[in-house]
Structures are given as structure tokens and as C-alpha cells.
Amino acid sequence: MPDSRQTHESAQAAFLWPSGGVHLWPSGAMSTLHSHQRGHLVYAARGVLAVHTGRGTSIVPANRVAWTPAGFAHRHRAHGRTDMRILFLPAPLARLLPEEPAVFSATALARAALLTLTGPRVHDADAASVNRGPLARVRRVLVDELRIADEQPLNLPEPRDDRLRVLARMLYEQPADNTPLPELGRAIGASARTISRLFHDELGMTFHQWRTQLRLYHALVLLADGHDTTYVAHACGWANPSHFIATFTSIIGSTPGRYRSGRERDDTTA
């Protein structure tokens, strides 16, 4: 039988087995910083997950799968009512995936495999009678599917430079802030050219790319909380909702309205 327990105070329910399991979390729930001896995949069957490591924050909506290798300290945070699935991988399969944390697009096949491998049918009281061979093959199909999937790094890397850290904190707190880069630079004591160089050298992206990722992160959180597209666009710094819709769709792969509607259907059927 599964070990049903609360892993932290805000968790509603956790059903854990040696190979993984299910966490049902209310919005805002967060795990403590921890690591595992085995690499694992996490998938949000409902809601939005943020996976925090020392290297930054990965955003995992329902069309993404996050990979955390063995030994990486991390914590999870739920945005919206979240059904988080965890799947630990045996070492031979884990070695086929990146040595660093990664986020992949989740195909329909990958999602079905994850739900099967973390569902109660393979872990209930009759689990001893289940033929493990097919499950092992499903795990291999899942890993093969991820290996050919594009990495989809909805990622906010963590700055090391003190000036960038101050700037990042300012924009975390006010994602709708449209202050031009030179003015932001004056506020933290650095030129726009210096900031641009630091973003490129430290984070591997431009300031504009980083701010767009930050805004999309906040947009996913607000959509998970049930806000409409126009509200989310303005709250995240887009003066024109159509520009927000175009950016969101190009990166997330779904319009904000369709993404929000799909989440609401999941909530009503869970």
C-alpha cells in the first residue's frame, strides 16, 4: 500500500512509493530544500510548479516536464491547486538524461506515461501481482520521448553579481515595471552596457529575454490563480494584451485563455 503522509505542513496529501508518487498541494505550498540519491522527473498534471535550485528557478506548467539529477538540492512551489507527479528513475535511465537540471516539452505520450507510472493502479494492494516488465518498458519509452523532445527552458537563472541580484529583486517584486535599462542601471550603480554584459556573461541571455521569462513566470502564476488574460497582461508589464498573447503563445505553446480554460476543466474534474 502507498505511504500516505504530509511531507510538509501545507501539503494536502502525498502518496509516495519507491518509484515516485503524487503530491496534491494548495496554491502557495512549498517544500523544504532537499536532494535525492536518484534523479527524478516532476510533472504538474494540474496547476503550475516552480522548481528552485541554486542555479535558478524553472517554471513547469502542464505542458512541461522538469528533470532534476541526483544530488541537486532543490525545492518545489505550487501555484494554483497543483497535482504534482514525481517519478524516480533507475541509474541506467537517468544517465540518458542531462547532467544538469532541465525542462522538456511534454508530448501527449510523455504525459500519459507519467500519469500511468505515478498512478494508483500500479501501486495499490494488488501491486505484487502486476507484471513489472511492461512498466519498465513504459519508463524507457518516456525517457526516449524526452530525449528527442526540445528542451523548453522556462528558466530564471540566479544572478551572482550583487548589482544583478538587486535588479532581479526589484523586478521580481514589480514585474510590470517598464523602466528603461539605463534608468534601472542608474538605480543600482551600473551602466546599461555593463548590465547587458553581465546578463550575457552570467546568465547566457539578454536583459530583455530574462525579463520576458520573469514576466511569463508571473503570468503563469496569475493564470493558475484564475485571473483573466487582460488583467494578467497588464499586471506583467504588457500595455497591449494582444502582444502578451502573442509572446505567451510563442513560448508556452498555447494562448493564455486556452491555457487557463484547460486548467479550470482539470480543477472541475479532479
Image (tube, rainbow, N blue to C red):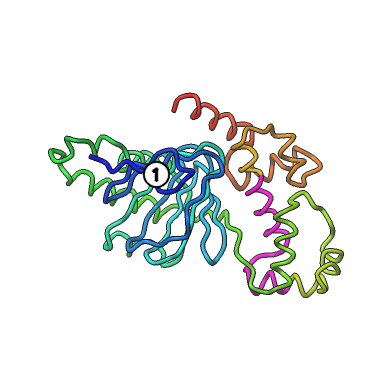
Looking at this view, is 208 or 176 the one in front?
A: 176
Query: Element type at marker 1?
Result: loop
Q: Is residue 260 left or right of residue 245?
A: left
Counting from the top left corner in percent of width and height, residue 18 is at 26, 51
Which residue sits furthest top?
268
Residue at point 67%, 59% (across, down): 210
- Dot 1 alpha-carbon crowd within 10 angstroms: few under 14, some 14 to 19, many 20 or more: some
Question: 88 above or below 253?
Answer: below
Which residue sits furthest front?
9
Q: Residue 109 lies in what quarter of the image? A: top left
Which residue, given by chain and number where applicable, does mark 1 sit on?
6
Residue at point 63%, 49% (across, down): 217
Residue at point 28%, 47% (across, down): 17
Counting from the top left corner in percent of width and height, residue 209 is at 68, 58
Work out which quarter of the rendered image holds the N terminus and state it: top left
Counting from the top left corner in percent of width and height, residue 110 is at 38, 44
Counting from the top left corner in percent of width and height, residue 236 is at 73, 46
Residue at point 28%, 63% (across, down): 91
Work out which quarter of the rendered image holds the C terminus and state it: top left
Q: Which residues are magenta?
A: 197-218
Residue 203 belongs to the span the image colors magenta: yes
Amino acid type, mark 1: Gln
Magenta span: predominant SS is helix
Looking at this view, is 20 or 253 the one in front?
A: 20
Which residue sits furthest left?
129
